């Protein structure tokens, strides 16, 4: 191997030699940071008002339902219009939602239904934002840099996942309004950064909008079993194993660590994930990708069980960190396969469907966790969910042999 020339990007940072990716990455980082701060702040505020695990579940459900109802529109928009512009508008809309939440704090509102209404608007903006921001990446970097770009993409989210909850918990513990103001400023900055992305080349849809064009994302996913298996595996694994919504219960009632401790718990998974993401930027997965992904999903379930049963803070944080590490590897493999196997002309619609599945696994998973915890207790809900994740990994390994036998992260030969 020869050393890179002074003007050549280092191998682990090749994506950043593309100017558009720099602005994109900055927008994604600021936005993800804001979302994490809002997530911690809203979760603690709602639980402080109602002391209800079910209401914590409604926080996730209110953000997921708009993505589900708009799935046929959001993906088509990302394929028909400028993905960069969609990102900027949606981030500005999210900033307006943060402003409304801040206004509720200043007025001393004690009812939670207006919060859920604003979160639904926030979820609608995210529903349009996510397909656009995900599908624009192959327009910003050449194919040889895509793996590196996806790894750095995941890193931006995980950096926010580590620092955002800690900062959000600290700010909320000092002054609740400050945490919402910080999120608002970050969302405004990310909107500007998105609009400053140089106009990328994009194969926009030209044909007339019909039911066939609107549903082509579903049709493509159903026809490509590797893509279908990868997306549905994440859906059911995290839907069952997700415990994020119940972290305020653990922080207040089980571990008794307060808002800052809640931030530490929320950051735990990000710590493990960012370490793995940093490793993947230098050492990408080159073989046995399918087997590695299934093993990591099963590992995620196993450490979910450990977290659910733990009443020791350091054990809980460690379990969350390992969960984050396993999840990072699974996400990296899944997102790379989806991007490489999907043509650019339908990438927005496929990304929209993928984001609905991701939203179902996260936000709907939070509702499932809150509902289960209110029915038969927090700890049993998390432990049973972890067991379900392991079962899903074993079942999907048999149902999708092509995905299990996938070895290299590349598109069709």
Image: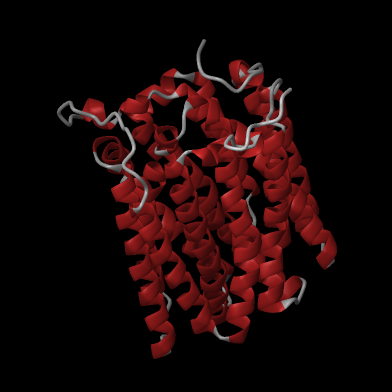
Q: Residue furthest bottom?
A: 107
Depth check, front residue: 217 or 113 = 217
Identify which residue is drawn at 73% across, 48% down: 275
Q: Is 402 left, or right, of 211 in this rendering?
A: right
Depth check, front residue: 80 or 114 = 80
Q: Residue furthest front?
A: 6
Place of residue 203 in the rendered image (x, y in percent of width and height, measured from the top left): 29, 28
User: Total number of numbered labels?
Assistant: 0
**Where's the N terminus, which quadrant?**
top right
Residue 335 appears anywhere in the view? yes
Identify which residue is drawn at 37% across, 82% down: 103
Q: Residue furthest top?
A: 413
Identify which residue is drawn at 17% across, 31% down: 209
Place of residue 171 in the rendered image (x, y in percent of width and height, measured from the top left): 59, 79
- The answer to whether residue 306 is above or below residue 167 is above
Place of residue 347 in the rendered image (x, y in percent of width and height, measured from the top left): 38, 31
Q: Is 151 left, or right, of 211 in this rendering?
A: right
Place of residue 53 in the rendered image (x, y in percent of width and height, measured from the top left): 58, 68
* Image quadrant assignment for residue 80: top left
Identify which residue is drawn at 49% across, 25% down: 143
Residue 55 appears anywhere in the view? no
- The answer to whether residue 159 is above or below residue 199 is below
Depth check, front residue: 227 or 78 = 78
Q: Is 343 left, or right, of 180 in this rendering?
A: left
């Amino acid at each position: 191997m020869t050393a890179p020339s002074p003007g050549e990007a280092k191998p682990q940072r090749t994506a950043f030699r593309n100017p558009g990716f720099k602005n994109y990455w900055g927008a994604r980082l600021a936005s993800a940071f804001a979302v994490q701060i809002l997530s911690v702040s809203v979760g603690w505020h709602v639980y402080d008002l109602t002391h209800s695990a079910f209401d914590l579940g409604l926080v996730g459900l209110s953000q997921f339902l708009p993505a589900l109802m708009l799935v046929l529109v959001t993906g088509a928009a990302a394929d028909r219009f400028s993905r960069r512009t969609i990102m900027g508008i949606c981030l500005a809309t999210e900033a307006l939602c943060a402003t409304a939440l801040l206004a509720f704090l200043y007025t001393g509102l004690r009812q939670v239904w207006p919060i859920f209404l604003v979160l639904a608007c926030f979820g609608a903006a995210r529903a349009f934002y996510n397909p656009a921001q995900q599908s624009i990446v192959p327009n910003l970097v050449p194919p040889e840099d895509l793996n590196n770009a996806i790894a750095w993409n995941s890193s931006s989210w995980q950096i926010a996942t580590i620092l955002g909850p800690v900062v959000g918990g600290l700010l909320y513990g000092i002054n609740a309004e400050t945490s919402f103001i910080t999120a608002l400023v970050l969302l405004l900055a990310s909107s500007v950064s998105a609009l400053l992305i140089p106009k990328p080349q994009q194969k926009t849809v030209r044909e007339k909008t019909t039911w066939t064009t609107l549903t082509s994302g579903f049709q493509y996913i159903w026809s490509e079993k590797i893509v279908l298996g990868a997306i549905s595996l994440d859906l059911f694994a995290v839907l069952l194993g997700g415990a994020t919504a119940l972290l305020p219960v653990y922080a207040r009632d089980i571990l008794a660590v307060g808002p800052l401790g809640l931030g530490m718990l929320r950051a735990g998974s990000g710590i493990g994930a960012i370490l793995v993401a940093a490793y993947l930027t230098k050492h990408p997965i080159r073989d046995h990708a399918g087997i590695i992904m299934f093993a990591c999903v099963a590992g995620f379930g196993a450490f979910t069980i450990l977290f659910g049963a733990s009443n020791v803070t350091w054990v809980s944080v460690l379990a969350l960190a390992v969960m984050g590490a396993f999840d990072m590897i699974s996400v990296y493999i899944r997102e790379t396969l989806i991007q490489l196997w999907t043509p650019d002309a339908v990438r927005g619609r496929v990304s929209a469907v993928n984001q609905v599945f991701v939203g179902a696994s996260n936000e709907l998973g939070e509702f499932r966790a809150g509902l289960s915890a209110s029915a038969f207790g927090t700890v049993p809900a998390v432990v049973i969910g972890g067991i379900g994740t392991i079962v899903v990994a074993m079942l999907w390994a048999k149902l999708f042999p092509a995905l299990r036998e996938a070895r290299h992260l590349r598109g069709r030969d």
